[in-house]
Image (cartoon, rainbow, N blue to C red):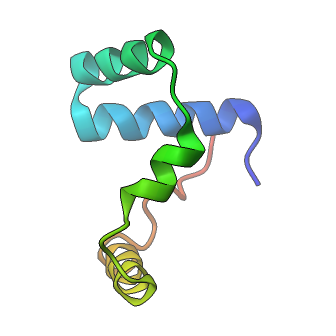
């Protein structure tokens, strides 16, 4: 399990990698500015997908990048 600091760093790296630095900062600003219920959002995120579909997608993603996010922290 990661420390809070390690998790923040990995999360920010993932956001910047996925969105780029400007859009990642914009996303964070939006999340802080607006009331947001993560649990409700997460429950609605994959409503159209079955558990099997989600599992297969997760396994395929893991096979595509088996060590991504596993680099040692400094």
Image quarter of residue 17: top left
Q: Which of 46 and 58 is in front in this view?
A: 46
Give the number of marks. Answer: 0
Q: Is 27 placed left or right of 31 in the picture?
A: left
The picture quadrant where one finds residue 18 is top left
Position in image of residue 58 (x %, y %): 40, 76
Q: Nearer the viewer, residue 62 or 68?
A: 62
Q: Work out whether residue 74 can be spotted.
A: no
Q: Left or right of 18: which side holds 55? A: right
Q: Which residue is drawn at 46% across and 67% down?
A: 67
- Viewer can see residue 14: yes
- Out of 1 and 49, give the one closest to the viewer: 49
Rendering coords of residue 50 (x, y %): 38, 83
Residue 52 position (above or below residue 35)? below
Quarter of the C terminus within the rendering: top right
72 on left or right of 25: right
Image coordinates of residue 49 in percent, x first then y, are: 33, 76
What residue is rendered at 32% in x and 81% in y?
A: 60
Q: Which quarter of the image is occupied by the N terminus?
A: bottom right
Q: Is residue 57 or residue 37 the one in the foreground? A: 37
At a point 74% along the width and 34% down the height, the residue shown is: 4
State the image coordinates of residue 64 (x, y, percent, origin top left).
Answer: 29, 75
Residue displayed at 53% across by 46% down? 40
Above or below for 32 versus 42: above
């Amino acid at each position: 399990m990661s420390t809070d600091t390690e998790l923040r760093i990995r999360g920010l790296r993932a956001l910047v990698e996925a969105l780029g630095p400007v859009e990642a900062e914009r996303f964070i600003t939006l999340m802080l500015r607006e009331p947001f219920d993560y649990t409700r959002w997460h429950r609605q995120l994959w409503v159209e997908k079955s558990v099997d579909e989600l599992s297969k997608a997760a396994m395929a993603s893991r096979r595509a990048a088996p060590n991504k996010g596993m680099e040692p922290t400094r």
